[in-house]
Amino acid sequence: MVTFEVAGRSKKDSETLSRIFARAGFLSGFHSQSFSDSTPERNGPPSSHYVRLEKEGILSREIPEAPDFLILLDSTVEIKPKKETIVMANTPKPKKAGEVDASSVSMESIKRHDIVPVMLGAALKAFGKIPLKNAKAAMETEGRKDSYAAVEAGYKAMK
C-alpha cells in the first residue's frame, strides 16, 4: 500500500488535489481512498487530506502515521516527515529536489494562479505509476480540463 498526505492552508485545494490524485490512481488500476483529517471548515490552519493506493484492496481506514509521500501546497505548513517520506513542496525559491514554484509554473502554463494541477503533475512524476493520460481523465471528471497544461508543466518542473 502507498500513502500520500496533501497538506496546505486551503482545505479546498488539499481536498481537490487528493480527490483528483485518487481518481487518477483508480483509473490506473489501483484501489483508492481519498479522505481527510478533522480540521476546521476555514482557511488558515493547516489542513491535511490523504490518499491511499493499493493493487489488491484497501482494508485500513485510519490516518497514516508516516505517509510514503508528502505534498506540501504551502511551504509555511510545518510538518516533520519521516526520513523515508518523499516530499514535494510548493516554494517560491526551489533549491533542491522535490521543490517546485507552483505559482510561477501555473501562471506560465495556464495564465492564472492554480497550484493544484501543478502539484498534481509533480506528485505523478514522483510516484511514477500513474500515467498522465489518467490524470487528464480525472481532471476532466472534476471539470478542470482547462488546467491540464499545468499538470504537464508541473510534471516537467519536478526534479
Image (tube, rainbow, N blue to C red):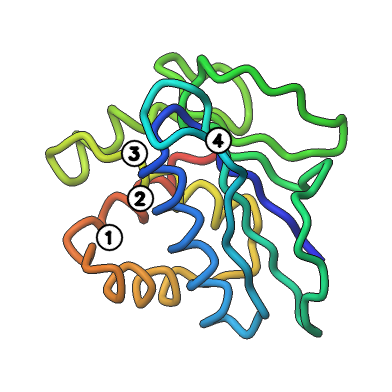
Tell me the quarter of the picture where residue 143 sits.
bottom left
> Residue under circle 1?
148
Q: Which of marks 1 and 3 precedes in the sequence?
A: 3
Residue 118 picture location, percent across and down: 38, 45
Name the residue at 42% across, 69% down. Answer: 135
Q: Position of residue 131 (x, y in %)?
A: 52, 72
Helix, strand or loop under label 4: strand
Instruction: Give the side of residue 56 with respect to residue 136, left or right.
Output: right
Callout in the foreground (4, 2):
4
Decide if residue 10 is on the left or right side of residue 111. right
Taking the spot 17% from the left edge, 61% from the top edge, the residue there is: 146
* Rendered-image quadrant of the N terminus: bottom right
Give the alpha-carbon distance from disc 1 to disc 2, as whole Å: 7 Å
Q: Residues within 10 Å of mark 1 (few under 14, many from 20)?
A: many
Residue type at mark 1?
Tyr
Q: Which residue is mark 3?
A: 115
Does dot 3 land on a helix, a strand or a loop?
Answer: helix
- Give yes or no for contact between labels 3 and 1 (Cβ–Cβ under 8 Å): no
* Residue at horizontal 63 percent and vertical 58 percent from the top: 51
- Separation of marks 4 and 2 at Cα, in angstroms: 15 Å
Residue at which label 2 appears:
117
